Amino acid sequence: LAQALSGKKGKIVIDVSGLQKIDTAFLQALLSVIASCRLSGREYEVRGKSEAFELILECYGINL
């Protein structure tokens, strides 16, 4: 993710469709990348939301 942020400008696509388990550290890193994109005006997309991903977002009350 750090490489994507520092690389060429363009949309960052994060595919989470294959995730079966997600920990808090991953979620924090993802939210940090999203915040960085928003601050810099860079486009991003979280694609293929898995059931595990939806559950952790619901658990923390996060709406992407």
Image: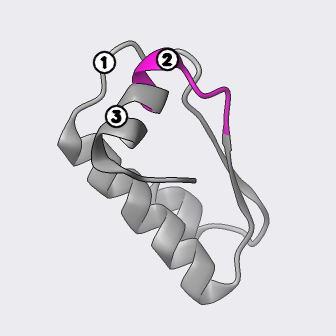
For label 3, the SS is helix
Image side of residue 1 versus residue 7, left or right: left
Q: Which residue is mark 2?
A: 51
- Which residue is found at the position 49% from the left and 76% from the top? 36
- Which residue is found at the position 29% from the left and 47% from the top? 60
Q: Which residue is mark 1?
A: 21
Of the residues under marks 2 and 3, which one precedes in the sequence?
2
Of the residues under marks 3 and 1, which one precedes in the sequence?
1
Query: Disc 2, disc 1: CB below 8 Å?
Result: no
- Residues shaded magenta: 47-53
Of the residues under marks 2 and 1, which one precedes in the sequence?
1
Q: Is residue 46 above or below residue 44?
A: above
Instruction: Specify the color scheme.
Output: one colour
Q: Type of residue at label 2?
A: Glu
Q: Type of residue at label 3?
A: Ile
Q: Is residue 8 above or below residue 27?
A: below
Mark 1 crowdedness (10 Å alpha carbons): few <14, some 14-19, many ≥20:
few
Q: Quadrant of residue 4?
A: bottom right
Q: Which residue is mark 3?
A: 56
Image side of residue 47 versus residue 62, left or right: right
Q: Quadrant of residue 58?
A: top left
Coordinates of residue 54 in the picture (x, y in percent):
48, 30
- The span from disc 2 to disc 3 (Cα, nearest Å) is 9 Å
- The span from disc 2 to disc 1 (Cα, nearest Å) is 9 Å
Coordinates of residue 42 in the picture (x, y in percent):
70, 75
Coordinates of residue 59 in the picture (x, y in percent):
30, 38
Mark 2 crowdedness (10 Å alpha carbons): few <14, some 14-19, many ≥20:
some
Q: Type of residue at label 1?
A: Lys
Q: Nearer the viewer, residue 51 or 40?
A: 51
